[in-house]
Image: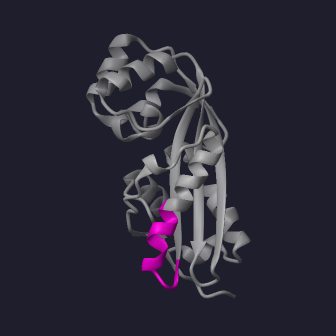
Amino acid sequence: MKRVPAFVLASASPARRQLLQSAGIEPMIQPSHFDESQVQATNPAEFVQILAQRKAEVVAPKFKDALVMGCDSVLALNCEIHGKPTDAAEAIARWQQMRGRVGELYTGHALIDQIQQKTLVRCQVTRVFFAQVSDRQIESYVATGEPMNCAGCFAIDGRGGLFVEKLEGCHSNVIGLSLPLLRQMLGELGYDVVDFWQ
């Protein structure tokens, strides 16, 4: 059996950290501070995979014997890629566009195994069915500040969950990290996810 390395999350996202903790993995947190404006891509799957890999690559050299995970999420709606809104006005306009429609939430996952010198990069997609919410509900939601730090302008695990009718695909992917995909990626590298349980 392979030696179990430390698990490093190259993200400051509290939601991703909580997801891992809820699954029994206590990650070391090392935000990458990677400048996302350096990456330009029109394909959402390609875009999030490049960003996830760049974030992991920035952090990996700081850890000799670790698994470093980078993630990035965007929402695709009408062939447009949406990340975090820049301000409240943009968040309101985005929700007015999203309500009653279906978007695809893409999350790129990159795992760098510093022991084996291997890198895996994958993407998970979940379809999100948005409710037909009122202007008042949108404005009240944006006023909470919750959507401002979320790709796609909503948090499924917060108040935003009230405004999503259903999901098709992986639920945890919409929070920021697909737990089933993580299990598969660890398996590809020769690890068993249960060995990372704390």
The kind of secondary structure the magenta stretch mainly shows is helix
* Total marks in image: 0
| Residue 119 percent location from the top left of the image | 64, 70
Residue 168 image-quadrant placement: top right
Q: Residue at x 44, y 64 (%)?
A: 10
| Residue 179 percent location from the top left of the image | 59, 56
The answer to whether one can see residue 24 in this image is no
Against 107, residue 127 (above or below) is above
Q: Residue at x 66, y 66 (%)?
A: 120
Left or right for 193, reference 12: right
Against 92, residue 25 (above or below) is below
Q: Which residues are magenta?
A: 55-66
Left or right for 17, reference 45: left
The answer to whether one can see residue 124 in this image is yes
Residue closer to the observer: 76 or 175: 76
Q: Is residue 3 magenta?
A: no
Q: Residue at x 45, y 67 (%)?
A: 58
